[in-house]
Image (cartoon, grey):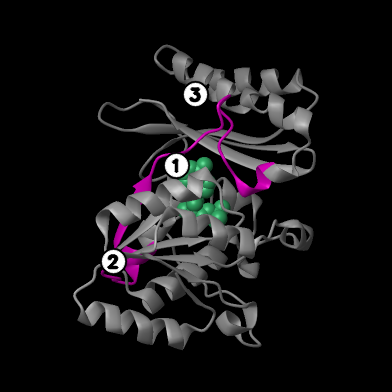
Amino acid sequence: MHLFDRKMELVSYLEGERKKNRTLGLVPTMGALHTGHLSLVKKALSENDLVVVSIFVNPTQFDKKDDLDKYPRSLERDIDLLKTVSKKIVVFAPTVDEIYGDQVKSESYEFDGLDKVMEGEFRAGHFDGVGTIVELLLRTVAPNKAYFGEKDFQQLQIIRKMAEIKKLPYTIIGCPIEREPHGLAMSSRNERLSKTTREQAGFIHDTLQTAKSKFGTESATTIADWVKSEFKKNPVFNLEYFEITDEATLTPMLKKQDNQKYRAFIAVYADGVRLIDNLRLN
Ligand code: AMP
């Protein structure tokens, strides 16, 4: 397996591969890899000759220094894990300096309001940071297809918008959420939960499932009120937001329209760790 920490070395290696007519997939990650990440890697391997997995904890997408400092890092373990998956994986694990030089800052994007709600509202500058790193990775790797998880559904829609605005000719593929057996969406942050909190964290997905079952008959406001009351009763999980939005525009659902797809989004704190999840409602 090839490992690169320099952009230019990666670019020249990939040029050689492209000359051999190899198709390229890209899976951007922040490492501490789990089954959720691997599902993206496996999908990319099934559709491309070679897959670049980037591992980079991107400082510009963190709004809190403490969250950045505590973000789990396990490069050696990640590389060992990827080696067990396939030889057709190339790892790109640059330093912050290699990506940003002495200017660790984001570009400002116009995402048509997709960045003004939910994660964008609660994490200032987050999506400009995401846009900056993903645009750089896309332009560096120039993949045929790039793979992103629906776990970060708002991020996926924003990346699609960025690719459209910037006229980037790479196909963006969304992949389903991988969950722990009791329903908690897999996340690198789950490692920071205590054992008991992690065991109880199926509560988040259970709540989304019940919200979905109410969706046929109840209004978005009634469902949101019910979710808030469930969280008030639970001392372990603190609700930051719950929203039901149109999937395409991410605007809150006011009145249900035929032919529109809706999704419920949630952000929760437990043990000081921020967890997000979402579920298609119809
Ligand atoms: P991260 O390392 O958290 O930045 O995630 C890297 C990519 O993996 C993103 O596209 C995520 O949406 C995706 N991802 C993370 N967790 C999951 C999961 N549980 N299921 C599917 N995709 C995921």
Front residue (pair 36, 167): 36
Q: What distance separates the C-alpha of mark 1 from that of mark 2?
A: 26 Å
Residue count near mark 1 (Cα–Cα under 10 Å), binned few <14, some 14–19, many ≥20: some
Disc number placed over residue 220 in the picture, else none: 3
Above or below — where is 36 with respect to 244?
below
Left or right: residue 118 compared with residue 228: left
Above or below — where is 106 with respect to 7?
above
Residue displayed at 36% across by 59% down? 161
Label 2 within 8 A of ligand 1 by Cβ: no
Q: Quadrant of the C terminus?
A: top left
Question: Considering only order in the chain, which callout, 1 or 3, is on the residue closer to the N terminus?
Answer: 3
Disc number placed over residue 16 in the picture, else none: none
Please report the bounds of the magenta region as a residue range: 162-190
**Pointer 2: what residue?**
170
Viewer-nearest of labels 2 and 3?
2
Q: Could you tell me the amino acid type at mark 1?
A: Thr
Disc number placed over residue 251 in the picture, else none: 1
Mark 1: secondary structure: loop
Q: Could you tell me the amino acid type at mark 2?
A: Tyr
